[in-house]
């Protein structure tokens, strides 16, 4: 089976939960919207290389996922909020075909984002178990291009990764989250995570790419 089409399950304290999503009490408590202000961006230096000063934050309305299987709808809704689309998570879930088994793949998030925003999104798969250098750079290019156009990126991830504050984020069965900003020319990525107690955090580009490995993203 194509890895991008896999449904996912998340093991939590010995309980297998289908859908690759988790919303504990701390995450659910963050359901109130929180906005992030946009920041100006500089793209390249005079030689056309990525400018390490370049940064951007896209304004979003954050919502935590309300149950264990709504990570796909929540992450997609966060991306839609940056483009003035204020759908409910239930409506997004219906469009995605989300069930208690989760949301099938990044192909679905791309489809729904395009249905609602005019067709600019594309799906990119990282087929390898570890992202190759060229795949990391493709993610950088795609994130910068999408965010500079005001389009947050929805990523389907799996496994454990550590943010820049040293906090681990573990989704062994899979999860969806939204990439909403970058700095240092894309070396650092801002993540809006609908299941994380803190809501948003920074992570290095390479770690994000390896988190997406064997899955895909909508940009």
Image: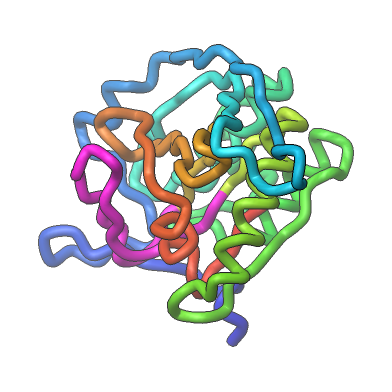
Segment colored magenta: 155-175
Q: Is residue 89 visible?
A: yes
Quarter of the N terminus within the rendering = bottom right
Q: Magenta region's main secondary structure?
A: strand
| Position above or below: 91 against 3 | above
Total numbered badges shown on the rendered structure: 0
Percent position of residue 116, x then y: 80, 35
User: 47 or 12: which is nearer to us?
Assistant: 47
Percent position of residue 2, x then y: 61, 82
Give the residue displayed 67% in from the left and 35% down from the top: 147
Among the 4 quarters of the image, the one containing residue 29 = top left
Give the residue displayed 65% in from the left and 49% down from the top: 96
- Colour scheme of the picture: rainbow
User: 210 or 107: which is nearer to us?
Assistant: 210
Would you say 198 lies left or right of 36 here? left
Q: Residue furthest bottom?
A: 1
Instruction: Please check the rendered image and state whether residue 105 is part of the magenta-colored stretch, yes or no.
Output: no
Q: Residue furthest right?
A: 118
């Amino acid at each position: 089976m194509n890895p991008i089409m896999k449904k996912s399950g998340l093991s939590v304290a010995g309980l297998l939960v289908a859908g690759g999503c988790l919303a504990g009490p701390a995450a659910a408590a963050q359901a109130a919207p929180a906005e992030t202000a946009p920041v100006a961006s500089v793209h390249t230096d005079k030689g056309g290389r990525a400018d390490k000063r370049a940064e951007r934050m896209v304004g979003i309305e954050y919502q935590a996922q309300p149950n264990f299987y709504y990570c796909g709808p929540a992450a997609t809704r966060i991306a839609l909020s940056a483009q003035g689309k204020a759908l409910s998570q239930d409506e997004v879930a219906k469009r995605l075909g989300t069930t208690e088994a989760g949301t099938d793949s990044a192909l679905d998030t791309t489809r729904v984002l395009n249905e609602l925003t005019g067709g600019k999104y594309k799906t990119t798969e990282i087929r390898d178990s570890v992202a190759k250098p060229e795949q990391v750079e493709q993610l950088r290019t795609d994130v910068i291009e999408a965010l500079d156009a005001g389009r947050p990126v929805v990523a389907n991830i799996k496994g454990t990764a550590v943010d820049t504050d040293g906090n681990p984020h573990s989704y062994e069965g899979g999860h969806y989250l939204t990439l909403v900003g970058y700095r240092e020319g894309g070396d650092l990525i801002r993540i809006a995570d609908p299941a994380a107690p803190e809501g948003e955090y920074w992570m290095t580009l390479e770690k994000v790419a390896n988190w997406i490995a064997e899955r895909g993203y909508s940009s």
